[in-house]
Image (cartoon, grey):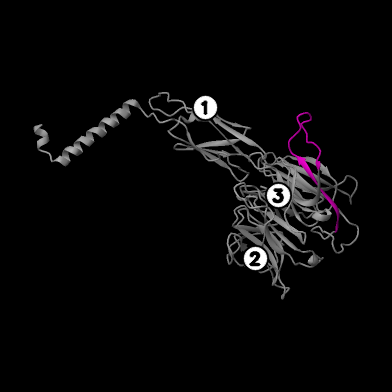
Amino acid sequence: MLMFKIYEPIDRAALSLILLLSLAIGLLVIAGNRSLLKVRDFSWKNQQVGARDTAFILTFSRPMDRGSVEANLRIEPALPGKISWSGRRLVYTLTAPPQYDRTYKIELQKAREKLGFDKQGSAIEPFVSQFRTPDRAFVYTGTAAAEKGRLILYNLTRKQKIILTPQNLVVKHFRIYPTGDRILFSASEWSNYKPGLFEQSLYTVTTGRNPNSTQKPGTIRQILGNQDYENLKFDLSPDGKAIAVQRANRNNPQDIGLWVLRSDVESTPQQLLSRPAGEFTIAPDSATLANPQAEGIAILSLTPNVKPLDFIPSFRRVFSFSPDGKESAMLKYNSDFTQSIFLVTNQGLQKELINTAGEFIACQFDPSNPQLYCLLTRRKPGQEFSEKLTLESVDLKTFQVKPLLVLPNQVETKMSLSPDGLELLFDRVVAKKTEPVKGDLRTDGGSAIEQSSLMLFSLKKTPKSNGYSSPQPLPLQGFRPQWLP
């Protein structure tokens, strides 16, 4: 009692509090951490994810024995990926896009917490969750009477068709935004749809694809009019924030150039290039553009008044970029009148992949495998002026070329690879033998379309023959199909 007399009342209260806290800490140390060991958060819980979603995160309530987690993590159906750690967070990075039209189940049991001195920690509370991928769906331009020239969304999973654009507009070209919720397209009134007349404006239309939005499909908004300039060709950046447009001044035919329009804000077009552009393509970084010229490919910044960033000589066109942007498939015209596709990397490597005496129609990188698919024509043996249209694949590890399919040699066939790399869409356009007249839909080359249908080709080998099944005709009349992401 004498000791306490030398302290003031506030000092005695502080000492008492310190003793109580020390006792509580001691009890916690003796008893151990009794909070429940569990998965605190799963970033894809009950979410819809697509090809652009490349990683999910599991966050644990306490430090984990990482080996036990990795050994017991289950995903069904299988989803290839790599695991990395950051503290209590597990990051699962996909090495291939998820299959569409699937519900994935993720499960973790028997994993244990991390304890020192080789002690075995307590087991985790069993964890089960799920996520799903979008329905398989694509967009095309209709050719049937009431659908002619209109953008149509077809849900392949539900066998459901939705007409997106009105009957008075005829769609020329379109690009799909990265989330699939909107489509950028050029279109003109039917009264202005004539050969040599470029009266199209740029519009967006909603698809209803976003599961978190209540916006209905078919809502149209004009992005760029055509009062002073004719809008010729355009491309949409992979991030959906920039539009490159080739435009021609109505009052000065010599004023043809490339312009950029930022689509995420209300803005006016800014000129990038004061001369005609080739078959330009915006790169996966959404900051640069590949513009073919007579001597090669110029790499331009999408920021105005910036000098060209690079020049790749001898090539005439960029057909496709790999998903990560590190590789591209470029077209080269050879001195022997053949054409070749080269693999060109950002490290300067140039490797010839495939050659033909015919011509290349399209090439696309497989998003799930190191593979390139090319649509091309080859001359028939012994028939100098007769060609066949073929689909061929190139293994980008072994560089082996494999013919997959021979197609009817139709006019200007278009090809689209699904975002999970499992299916290809083709159109089969039959052109009229007469010149186009008012009311005719036309191909890019100006031919009048007699009829056009769509075909679906599975890239999954059949178990019995270890080969590919025949293309499946779809009950749709249209052309220019593109998969929704």
Q: Residue at x 58, y 43 (%)?
A: 54
In the figure, is residue 110 to the left or right of 314?
Answer: left
In the figure, is residue 29 to the left or right of 168?
Answer: left
Res 259 label: 2
Residue 102 appears in the picture as rendered: yes
Check disc 2 and give the amino acid type.
Trp
Name the residue tied to disc 3. 342
Give the mark, 2 or 3, whose residue is nearer the N terminus.
2
Region rendered in magenta: 448-473
Q: Residues within 10 Å of mark 1 (few under 14, many from 20)?
A: some
Name the residue tied to disc 1. 109
Q: Residue at x 59, y 47 (%)?
A: 212
Give the mark, 1 or 3, whose residue is nearer the N terminus.
1
- The vertical placement of 422 against 377, above or below, is above
Check disc 3 and give the amino acid type.
Phe
Callout in the foreground (2, 3): 2
